[in-house]
Structures are given as C-alpha cells and as structure tokens.
Amino acid sequence: MAEETATTAPTTDAPATERRPPRSGPGGGGGREGGGGRKYFRRKKVCKFCTEKIEAINYKDVRLLAQFVAESGKIVPRRLTGVCTPHQRRLSSAIKQARNIALLPFAGRAS
C-alpha cells in the first residue's frame, strides 16, 4: 500500500506554463476569446453625474436618488452603478439625508 500512495516528482520535460481549457459558466474565461467564456463584452460603466455634468446632488431630488437605492432599501454600490468615488460619497450622504426627513424609506417593502 505504501508504494501506491507515494508521490512522484514532476518531470522537467513538461513546459513551464500549461495551457488550461477555457472556463465555462458565469464570469469564466476572459474577454472576447472564442469558445466558452462570456457571451457578450461588458462595457465600462461611466459616472452618470460626470457625463450629465450634474455638480450638486440634492437630497430633495427623490426621483434621482431612488435610482441608486435597491428595492430592499440598500444603497447600490458603485461597482454596480458605475458612479465615480466622489459622486458616490455625495450620493450616499444625500440618500441618508433624504431618509432622515422621510423622503426615502429606510427599508424596502415588507413581503
């Protein structure tokens, strides 16, 4: 039994970098290579506030703020919305301010 479980040293004849088959499934593979991988090319998200040149994020603008709040009531993270860091900071403080004066709900709808 001891002979069967003994490990063998790797051979030096094999190339240093092995080619793996492309992953399948969500997020697998990379980029736009053919065979496996993603079905579409994900476009880089751009900040809505920078493109529309919105300088001040007003806490009274509930229609704008509601776009960045999930149904559960959570603030949607910037990796999902594409908002840049300084605008995300202003946006989150405006959402919190609107919640405090009851313009936006703290929690989502109860099911």
Image: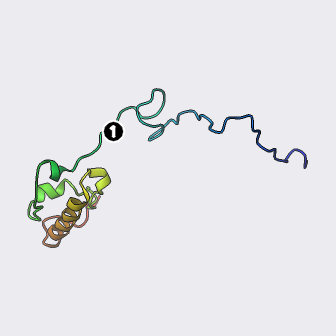
- Identify the residue at the far bottom of this view: 100
- Nearer-the-camera pick, 101 or 86: 86
Secondary structure beneath label 1: loop
Residue 10 percent location from the top left of the image: 76, 42
Q: Is residue 41 above or below residue 99?
A: above
Q: How many marks?
A: 1
Q: Residue at point 81% right, 44% down?
A: 8
Q: Residue at point 45% right, 40% down?
A: 26
Dot 1, how many residues are within 10 Å of its Cα: few (below 14), some (14-19), or many (20+)? few
Q: In which image quadrant can residue 85 be found?
A: bottom left
Q: Is residue 36 left or right of residue 72?
A: right
Give the residue at mark 1: 42
Q: Image quadrant for the C terminus?
A: bottom left
Residue 90 percent location from the top left of the image: 19, 64
Q: Amino acid at mark 1?
A: Arg
- Nearer-the-camera pick, 107 or 77: 77
Q: Residue at point 28% right, 57% down?
A: 76
Residue 77 percent location from the top left of the image: 30, 57
Q: Is residue 75 above or below residue 37?
A: below
Residue 3 percent location from the top left of the image: 90, 46
